[in-house]
Amino acid sequence: MRIGVFVCQCGTNIAATVDTEAVAEAAMSMRDVYHAESIQYSCSDPGQRQVIAAAHQHRLDRVVIAACSPRMHETTFQRAVIQAGINPFMLEMVNIREQCSWIHEDREVATTKAIDLVAAGVARVRGQVPLKRGRVPVVGEALVVGGGIAGIQAALDIADAGMPVTLVEREPTIGGNMARLDKTFPTLDCSSCILTPRMVELKHHENIRLMVSSEVTAVRGYIGNFEVDIRKKATCVDEEKCTGCRICEEKCPSRAPDEFNAGVGESKAISIAFPQAVPLVAALRKEHCRQFIKGKCGVCKKVCPADAVDYEQEDELHTEKFGAIIVATGYRLFDWEGAYPDYGGGLYPDVITSLQYERMLSASGPTGGHIVRPSDGREPRDIVFLSCVGSRAESVGRPFCCNVGCMYIAKQAIQTREHLPDSRCYVFYMDVRACGKGYEEVYRRAQVEAGAVYLRGRVGKIYPRGDKLVVMGTDTLIGDQVEIETDLVVLAVGFAAAEGAGELARRLNIAYDGYQFFTESHPKLRPVETTTGGIFLAGACQGPKDIPASVAQASAAAAKAIRLLSREDLETSPMVAEVNHMRCIGCFKCAEVCPYNAIEKQKLHDGRTVAVIIESLCQGCGLCNVACPPQVISLRGYTDNQLISEVVEVLR
Ligand SMILES: Cc1cc2nc3c(=O)[nH]c(=O)nc-3n(C[C@H](O)[C@H](O)[C@H](O)COP(=O)(O)OP(=O)(O)OC[C@H]3O[C@@H](n4cnc5c(N)ncnc54)[C@H](O)[C@@H]3O)c2cc1C
């Protein structure tokens, strides 16, 4: 056994805090180490050549690189050791940057710790054996979860590349939040005019299967080979038969909240969300339907000319295989009411959200495009916009920026002047963030053309006075209190993750942050990948985003998925579980916990039935190791002996 240790200086990233020469010198005294040196940039071409040359010169058969995270450069160094004739799995990376130099200031302490970490790495690589990768075929179809603009874009891009896609949307129509918008910044063009052609294109695309009113309930498998359970909820309407005539909706006697219109106005228990819905098919909500609540009604069934209403319809369960998954489940507005009692906490009808205002501005919305006060249906003259309600607000636990509030307030102020030329708009803001292309111009238009008065400061209280509302705030530029009597208040409420996002993340086995936005694999270098191979992110499900950014990310995610799906097979990691059949007691606790169905029973010649690992399915997650009562399962590359010897070195 001949081990080489290479200690990277990473410029001054490591060398400023860790004495890399001293670490190399200490390594030379470790058992089986035949060569150790400090290298300025080990990942650079000359650095790698130095490793290869030393490996040849000292006839090394194992290598320890003390540098950065293996997530950054393990593949780089695996390639280098292969060139030196060494099996790529006889390499151990020790992270003395993130785990040492970046987190310590004291050079002596950091150097001592680096030596300990290197000693642990040497101990671990000593127990390593050469391993060989396998290959598994890739299922050539993609799943897109969520049918907002991001999901639509991703599905179309993949389908246009000639690959089959299934898009699963939990609402009865695709379109997401963009379908609720009237006009869109920065160009102020009509939202439906640019969105609905894409929705229709998706519906009719030969490579796309659209599943609405559907949700992903379970995900098994791994990159290239996911097995997904999808539940299609019963909507009591046969999608094939429904012609979208809306007679059922017209005649339905059961009222229901209008979720599409953000609660402005009412809907019916059986309805179509909006005129351009795709598919243009009615859906019945049992919780609001007399037929289901009282057991009698049946009006919709009687009046339907297509005989499409079916009260007996049941949920359908589908299990499908996919090679790649794109998650595009978007956002909802932060639930502001409980957090802002000083703004009336939802009690004042004339304090509305920006999304409700958007629906009011829309010609296809509940007020037919007329701006009115919900309390009395009158046109308002004074309108106050409040930015950052539930965003950039530490006090309510929402410290992050919503990314779009400043811009859509400017947009809505411009639109307000177009709808009501005599109106006056006031905007309370923290700072105006108008960083995208053409965004500053929209902000200027709001001030100059629409005459919106911008007041820098937070609003402390909103309260009623007669039939008006009083908005009390501070103008921090003049350093004084301001009080505005107004007819309508529009709150620019911040983004929250879609309902159930955390649960979906757990099903998909992807990471999410404290606000349930899904976490990208690397914020700069892998912004659309998740930490689970083969699952990508698109749009506002990853964090607040506007439409251009959502579309760009969706196309990037689609490109990643296409790259994966266009391969016939994938290399698998050889770091899989292994069962010692001599000692296996055949309890199959391992098979119960295996998320990849990678363990099967096998009868041996001696009559015993033991657990056998299907190597092409095993992902080396280690769950079976832990669950095995007699502890006879080990993970290649992570055997108990290797891990214990590593720990012993650190504690020595
Ligand atoms: C008031 C307001 C005005 C705005 N105006 C503009 C503007 O003018 N210009 C601009 O660029 N941006 C604007 N935005 C931002 C814009 O709405 C978003 O950028 C865009 O909608 C993000 O698209 P998305 O597809 O990521 O998410 P969404 O539009 O939220 O779509 C997500 C979809 O996923 C579905 N879904 C959720 N969970 C699941 C699940 N578990 N399973 C299946 N499906 C699921 C949802 O039903 C939805 O259809 C505005 C936002 C607001 C609040």
Image (cartoon, rainbow, N blue to C red):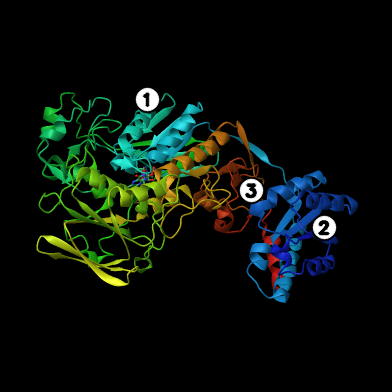
Residue 272 pos. (x, y %):
22, 35
Q: Circle 2 — which element?
A: strand
Which amino acid, mark 1? His
How far apart in space, not on screen, are marks 2 and 1 (Cα)?
61 Å
Q: Quadrant of residue 349?
A: bottom left
From the viewer's perspective, is the residue at label 2 or at label 1 nearer?
1
Can the viewer see residue 138?
Answer: no
Q: Quadrant of residue 433?
A: bottom left
Q: Is mark 2 within 8 Å of ligand 1?
A: no
Q: Which mark is residue 113?
A: none
Q: Is residue 375 left or right of residue 505?
A: left
Which amino acid, mark 3? Val
What crowding class fits label 2: few (fewer than 14 Cα within 10 Å), some (14-19), or many (20 or more)?
many
**For this rendering, which residue is in front, 622 or 514?**
514
Which amino acid, mark 2? Ile
Name the residue at the right extreme. Answer: 57
How far apart in space, not on screen, are marks 3 and 1 (Cα)?
43 Å
Can the viewer see residue 368?
Answer: yes
**In the image, what residue occupies the spot 80% across and 50% down?**
46
Q: Is mark 3 within 8 Å of ligand 1?
A: no
Where does label 1 land, which residue?
204
Q: Is residue 350 left or right of residue 227?
A: left
Q: Is residue 325 left or right of residue 370?
A: right
Where does label 2 land, which residue?
3
**For this rendering, which residue is in front, 350 or 140?**
350
Residue 241 pos. (x, y %):
24, 25
Q: Circle 1 — which element?
A: helix
Q: Earlier in the sequence, mark 2 or mark 1?
A: 2
Where does label 3 land, which residue?
576
